[in-house]
Amino acid sequence: MREQEDPKSKENRKRNAFTLRLNMFFGMTFIVFSILIVRLAILQFVDAPKFQAELDDNGTRSVKIPPIRGNILDSQGKPLAYSTSTQSLYYTIQAGLKDADADKLAQKLFDIFTKIGTPDQKLTVKEIKKRMDLAHIQNTYAVPRRIKMGLSEAEIAYFSENREQYPGFDIVEESVRNYDKDDVAVQLVGYLKKYRGVRESMSKYKNIADQEDAKQQYLDDEDVGVDGLEYMYQDVLRGENGLKDYPVNAKETIIGPPVVTVPVKGDNLFLTIDKRVQLLTQQAITDHLAYMKTASGYYKDGADATTGYAVAMEVNTGKVVAMASMPDYDPSVWEGGSISPEDWDATTYFQANGTIRQAYPPYADEKERNRHPSSIVPLGSTQKPLSVLIGLNEKLFTTHDVFNDTGVFLFGKSKPQVAIHDSQGHAYGHIDAAGAIQHSSNTFMAAMVGNKLYQKYKGAKGVDVWDNYVKQFGLGVSTESGLPGESKGVIDYYHESETASSQSALIRASFGQQAKYTTLQLAQYAAMLGNEGKRMQPQFVNKVVDQDGKVVQGFTPKVLNTVSFPQEYWDEIYAGMSKVSVQGFDDFKYNFLRKTGTSEQDVGDRKKVENSVFIALAPAEHPVLAVAVVVPDGGFGAYGAAPIARKIFDAYDEYVGLDGTPHPPPTNTAAGTTNTTGGTAANGQTAAH
């Protein structure tokens, strides 16, 4: 029989078992909490920095959306340079991409482009891979690469619908620059190049990459202005980038939809240039250059001329309504921001704007090219109205004084003395200052201006006095047009003063030698004669208008400096300028002021090459338009340049109106038929040269 367990012992056993279980529970609880505490400590002190770093590495990847460039339009709103939008495919290199994967991707893209792309944009697999730029030759790692521009609608739809199959790819709207097919003022308008090609060579673009605001940074494949108004107004025309900000993790994997900031389109420029007047100006130069090749008489002296330059500027506003540098070229060679070697060779001598800087004649052979003058030439006798003003203001003579022009003026201490002659051996007899301008007397200028100025100031100081006067009239200083690459001209009279004599420098300068100037400087000078002493800043833009049609910037006439002379001095030069005989103006319905110039220079092995120079103002009573024409190698100014100016005045009168009212020509007559044939000299006189 089993022994009965003592109740007390049984109670103790139960208590011990409970205590054991309780201790085991607390022990397990302690272990669990200890593990949790240790784990929390590890999370806090060991893993937390790593997780924080990963969290910090999650950020955004910004893809710049280039803005649509603003348009350049003429004064009537006709587009001269304009942008059309296109869709481009860009690629940003993905982390871990291997070369073999890139080959497959390039092949895949090639297949898609071939299947649904435009036939005229064929890319090879090799070219696609080159554009991916895996070696970072053209771009840094994070910069998107343009794979293809001008996607077809089918390509746009395909890549939009299959975005997940093409990580790193984006469709971006871009602008394509187009230029007027009529080739209107192409050198003035300028052209574009790729940013990556000029960011180191042009100071304007060197610091663009350092801009903190991503909206102001440029894309490497973006087209930027490098010449003309495209460069001058780059900041206005460009607009601002848009942005696609993608959230990405530490591995640069996109982890969410982008936040899009829409780009701001560039503003539009409305120019002072009138396309109609501009085209007729260009044609006038081209026609006259061709005419002189086969003409007879004095016109044949310009048979070697290959270039011509003209500027028409409003006298009281400084607005340039025409600026022609001929020959010109088709600016479409720059479409896409680059130019082929063949197009470069074909256009290299026509790209420079010869009205503001040095441009060379289009001879491929360097030796032959060096035998012909560039676009910057001496003024010749167009200097003489200013010479008379200087002489009068310096009290070297009066409006009543008479000079006996014997056809020659001698100067210098050595024997034989240096002889200054009038053109073609003329001797004009007794003439006053107005008559000296009318007949273009070299001897009057030499004796009454140059030599007397030398005598008054006892040598070199007279050269400084001369320099001060001509610079006040914009000769030898910037016109302040703002155009890139503008020349201040080439001053030789200081060199002549140092190497020969101050007397020689002043005498030769007085009739238009010893300095060379641009056509724009000549036009600004002519306008200053017309408005009696106000040097107007040349203006090319009437207004800047945003994409909503709002005028954001207007332009008003700006006077750079003024000179003040007694009215009788101005009247004296006008009396002379109103009687200068020229070709092509015999039936001109307005009274006009003009001065011809035939400047001489030695070029290479050719001695005394004659350049044709001409300035004119109309109407004479209240000048509205100043025209300057330069034809290097063109012979006498009355024949090589004046007929071109007549056509420019006719064009302005037809479309704008020299009296404020446009005057279209009668439909049954051919306008300007005497311009190329020369006709008779204005006033029925033998033309001054």
Image (cartoon, rainbow, N blue to C red):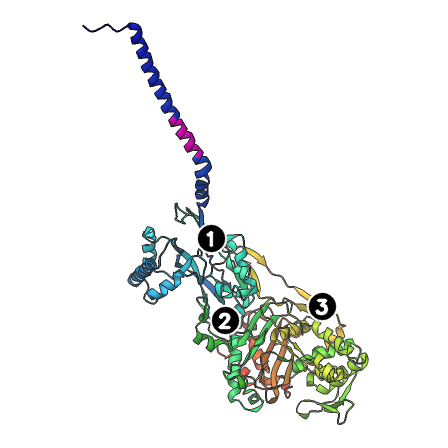
Residue 379 higher or lower than 161, as above or below: below
In the rendered image, residue 267, in percent from the top left (x then y), is placed at 52, 58
33 within the magenta span: yes
In screen coordinates, is 607 left or right of 13? Answer: right
Q: Residues within 10 Å of mark 1 (few under 14, many from 20)?
A: many
Mark sitting earlier along the chain (2/1):
2
Nearer to us of marks 2 and 1 is: 1
Quarter residue 51 falls in: top left
In the structure shown, which secondary structural element does the residue marked by tag 1 occupy?
A: strand
What's under tag 2, amino acid-wise?
A: Val
**Which residues make up the magenta segment?**
31-41
> Are circles 3 and 1 on residues that touch, CB within 8 Å?
no
Q: Main secondary structure of the magenta part?
A: helix
Numbered tag placed on residue 242 in the rendering: 1
SS at circle 2: loop
The image shows residue 359 at horizontal and vertical percentages of 56, 77
Disc assigned to residue 562: 3
Q: Is residue 618 visible?
A: no
Residue wearing tag 2: 184
Residue type marked 1: Gly
Q: Say left or right for 135 vs 636.
A: left
**Percent x, y for residue 302?**
56, 86
Mark 2 or 3, nearer chain start: 2
Q: CA distance from mark 2 to mark 3?
A: 33 Å
